[in-house]
Amino acid sequence: MRILAYSHNFVREGAPIILLRLLRELRKRHEVVILKLRRPTEPLEAEFERYGIPLKEVVQLKDFDVALFNTVTASELVTQAAGRCPLVWWIHEPKFGLGYTKMADFKPEAFGAAQRIVFPTQWQAQWLWGKYLTRDNWTVVPYGIGMDLSPRPCPFEKQPGRFYLLHLGRIDPRKGQDLSVRALAHLGNPNITLVMLGGRKENDPFATRLFESGVDILYPGSVPEELVNAYIQHCDAMIFPTRDDLITLAILEGLSFSKCVLASDFGPIPETIIQGRTGLLSPVNDYRVLAGNIRMIYEDRELAERLGQSGHEILQRKHGFAAHVAAMERELERVARKG
């Protein structure tokens, strides 16, 4: 197949990274091109080119067998391309994406125009976007996680006796870094370091408050995939008290390395992080319960190890990367031009 892909940005965050990992696999069997955005270069552009996926500013839809448009922000492009090129629309957004429906360039008719719509979770399709799904043209393909699990050297200077909690994701109230900080402040354990990986806005007061909290924080910023893998390997557990997310990249990456995950019970997360079996959950916005969960795995490292191993097992059953790629490939082939 000749596949044209579109990403709303090339920042190191969930949806573009998931698209990159899919396309670098499809590139082994198909011709793949991604639209280049007419704005300053962003970090993931070099990653696409590194894997042999060219970025082009100008394309002709007739030259492609199928298009893959990433995120709900592509609704206007979906309506423009409909009838000119078969297309699959991949919608990742949880609740915050509903805010886009109030913007002038949102096109609800795109839900009927797309040949196929793919959601990562049934919860999202049913409870968030259900009212727009007027045709039987959608399906659910769970996320898979294509990661290099090779052992890597520790990217930071570990101090003996310290416990390192990794909060992975762009610094944003939605991701709940403030809850991680409040939980650690409430716990008052001087032997725990919070490692935060992810980009941040310049002069962001939310981020400033985190760094001025008095909690011991290590913040390397936004780093390439290889370094993300190294940080996960060398931290003791993952913490993800999100206010609005799916079974997201950060959770799956932690489970890939058999790390114990402490997450909120938002939306579909309990389908994979099962309380007391594959991780520990806290109610959304409840930093006190989160603090209790941190204390539990700090004091019982064998529990943390068991939860991490069980989490890895459910990852392999529900979120295998090969199955994810095969399902996405089938959706593209289902609507692609033949011959």
Image (cartoon, rainbow, N blue to C red):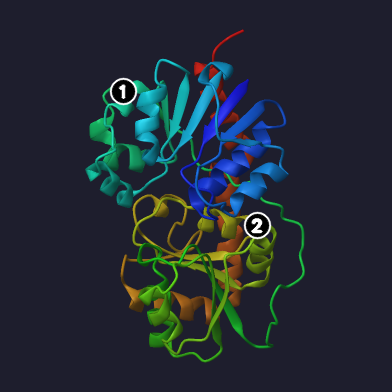
Residue type of the residue flagged with mark 2 = Glu
Q: Give residue 13's position: percent from left, percent from top.
A: 51, 55
> Where is residue 209, by image quadrant?
bottom left
Q: Earlier in the sequence, mark 1 or mark 2?
A: 1
Residue at the spot 55% in from the left edge and 41% down from the top edge:
19
Residue at the spot 57% in from the left edge and 36% down from the top edge:
324
Judged left or right of residue 87, residue 321 is: right
Q: Give residue 131's position: percent from left, percent from top.
A: 23, 33
Q: Give residue 137's position: percent from left, percent from top.
A: 37, 22
Q: CA distance from mark 1 to mark 2?
A: 36 Å
Q: Which mark is residue 112?
A: 1
Residue type of the residue flagged with mark 1 = Gly
Residue at the spot 54% in from the left edge and 49% down from the top edge:
10
Q: Residue furthest top?
A: 339
Give whichever of 174, 250 is nearer the camera: 174
The residue identified by callout 2 is 225
Q: Which mark is residue 51?
A: none
Give whichever of 278, 184 is nearer the camera: 184
Contact check, label 1 and label 2, Cβ < 8 Å: no
Q: Please tell me whether mark 2 sits on a helix, a strand or a loop.
A: helix
Residue at the spot 41% in from the left edge and 38% down from the top edge:
91
> Where is residue 244, by image quadrant?
bottom left
Q: Give residue 25's position: percent from left, percent from top.
A: 67, 36
Q: Is residue 152 above or below residue 92?
A: below
